[in-house]
Image (cartoon, rainbow, N blue to C red):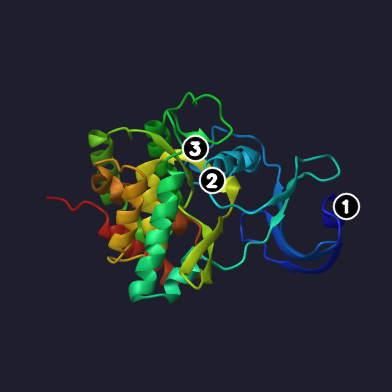
C-alpha cells in the first residue's frame, strides 16, 4: 500500500498499534528517490457513523473527521506532519488509510515525565503557547470537526449522559462502587450550578498531544498528532483532561503553562470551579477500561476520584 500510493521501497515496518482502539499503527521506513522517508501508517476501522454515542462524542475518536481537523489545524499554522496520502474506506480495504510524515522527537507526556525544574517549566510554556493557539480555533457548538450543524442533544445534556455511562462502567470495580452515592451527589451539584462555556474550542481529546525535539535553543514542537481525536469541545474539559493527563496528583502544570496560554487566548473564569467535574469524567473513563487484574492502578485511580468528590456537610 505504501509503495503503491507513496512510492519508494519499504525497508522496515514496526508495529506500534494501540491496545483496545482497534486501529493499526505502523512506523515504516521508506527509501524514496529523494532519500529516506520515515512514515507513520494508520489504518482505522470504518466504525458505524454513530453520532448518538455520547461517550465517544465527549471523549473518543472519529476517523472520518481526520481531514477536516487536519485542514483546520493547517489553516491555523499549527505544526503538523506532512500528509502523503489519505484514503476513505473501500470494499477491498475497509479502513481509513493515512500515510504521513513520522515526526522526530518525543511525545509530550513521556518527555515531561523525564524533565524537572526549569526544563519542565520551559516545556510547559511551549505547550501553553501552542495549545492556546489551537484553542483560538472556535465555533458555537461542540462536536466533530466535520460537523456542519449541532447535534439535537446539546453539550450539557450529552456530557452528563456520558458521565452516567462512564460511572456505570467504572462501578464494576468494588473499590469505586463504594463511592457511588457520593459521586452521584457530586454530579447533581455540578448539574445544578452548570454554566455553558463561552465557546467551543478545537482540541485533541486529551487536550494536547504532540512531538518535541531538542534544539540548540531548547525544546521545539515538531508537530501535533492524532488528528482523528480532534473535535470542538468545552475549553474547560480539554484543559482539565490535559492537567490530569500530565500528572495525577496535587502538582499539575507549571505556572509557565498558564502564562503562555493566556498570552494566546482567554480562559473561562469558572474553569477552576468545574475542573474537578471534568477530571472525574476522564478518571472514571480510564477506570472503566482497566482490568480487575490491575489492583494497583484501580487503587490509584480510585484515590484520585475520591479526592475530587464533594464531601457531605
Q: Residues within 10 Å of mark 3 (few under 14, many from 20)?
A: many
Q: Looking at the image, is 266 positioned above or below residue 121?
A: above
Q: Residue furthest front?
A: 216
192 and 268: which one is in front? Answer: 268
Q: Which residue is mark 1?
A: 4
Q: Which residue is mark 3?
A: 54
Q: Going from the N terminus, do you reach mark 2 or mark 3 first?
A: 3
Question: Which quadrant of the view contains residue 257?
Answer: bottom left
- Image coordinates of residue 185 in percent, x first then y, are 25, 44
Q: Going from the N terminus, do you reach mark 1 or mark 2 first?
A: 1
> Disc 2 versus disc 3: distance between alpha carbons?
30 Å
Figure quadrant of the N terminus: bottom right
Mark 1, secondary structure of its residue:
helix
Residue 174 in sight here: no
Q: Is residue 52 left or right of residue 142?
A: right
176 and 283: which one is in front? Answer: 283
Q: Going from the N terminus, do you reach mark 1 or mark 3 first?
A: 1
> Disc 1 versus disc 3: distance between alpha carbons?
38 Å
Question: Which quadrant of the view contains residue 308?
Answer: bottom left
Q: Residues within 10 Å of mark 1 (few under 14, many from 20)?
A: few
- Image coordinates of residue 220 in percent, x first then y, are 50, 64
Q: Residues within 10 Å of mark 2 (few under 14, many from 20)?
A: few
Q: Which residue is mark 2?
A: 77
Amino acid at each position: 500500500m505504501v509503495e503503491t500510493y507513496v512510492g519508494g521501497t519499504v525497508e522496515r515496518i514496526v508495529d506500534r498499534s494501540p491496545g483496545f482502539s482497534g486501529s493499526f499503527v505502523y512506523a515504516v521506513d521508506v527509501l524514496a528517490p529523494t532519500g529516506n522517508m520515515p512514515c507513520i501508517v494508520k489504518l482505522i476501522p470504518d466504525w458505524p457513523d454513530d453520532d448518538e454515542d455520547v461517550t465517544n462524542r465527549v471523549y473518543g475518536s472519529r476517523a472520518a473527521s481526520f481531514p477536516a481537523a487536519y485542514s483546520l489545524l493547517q489553516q491555523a499554522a499549527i505544526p503538523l506532519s506532512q500528509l502523503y496520502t489519505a484514503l476513505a474506506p473501500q470494499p477491498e480495504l475497509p479502513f481509513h488509510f493515512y500515510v504521513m510524515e513520522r515526526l522526530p522527537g518525543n511525545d509530550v507526556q513521556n518527555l515531561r515525565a523525564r524533565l524537572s525544574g526549569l526544563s519542565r517549566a520551559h516545556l510547559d510554556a511551549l505547550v501553553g503557547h501552542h495549545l492556546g493557539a489551537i484553542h483560538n480555533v472556535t465555533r458555537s457548538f461542540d462536536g466533530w470537526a466535520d460537523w456542519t450543524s449541532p447535534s439535537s442533544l446539546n453539550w450539557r445534556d450529552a456530557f452528563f449522559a456520558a458521565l452516567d455511562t462512564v460511572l456505570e462502567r467504572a462501578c464494576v470495580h468494588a473499590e469505586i462502587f463504594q463511592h457511588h452515592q457520593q459521586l452521584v451527589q457530586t454530579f447533581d451539584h455540578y448539574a445544578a450550578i452548570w454554566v455553558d462555556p463561552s465557546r467551543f474550542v478545537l482540541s485533541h481529546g486529551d487536550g494536547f498531544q504532540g512531538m518535541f525535539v531538542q534544539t540548540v535553543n531548547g525544546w521545539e514542537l515538531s508537530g501535533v498528532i492524532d488528528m482523528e481525536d480532534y473535535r470542538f469541545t468545552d475549553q474547560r474539559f480539554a484543559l482539565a483532561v490535559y492537567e490530569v493527563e500530565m500528572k495525577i496528583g496535587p502538582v499539575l502544570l507549571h505556572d509557565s503553562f498558564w502564562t503562555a496560554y493566556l498570552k494566546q487566548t482567554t480562559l473561562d473564569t469558572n474553569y477552576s470551579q468545574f475542573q474537578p467535574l471534568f477530571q472525574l469524567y476522564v478518571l472514571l473513563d480510564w477506570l472503566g477500561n482497566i482490568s480487575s487484574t490491575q489492583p494497583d492502578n484501580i487503587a490509584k485511580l480510585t484515590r484520585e476520584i475520591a479526592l475530587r468528590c464533594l464531601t457531605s456537610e
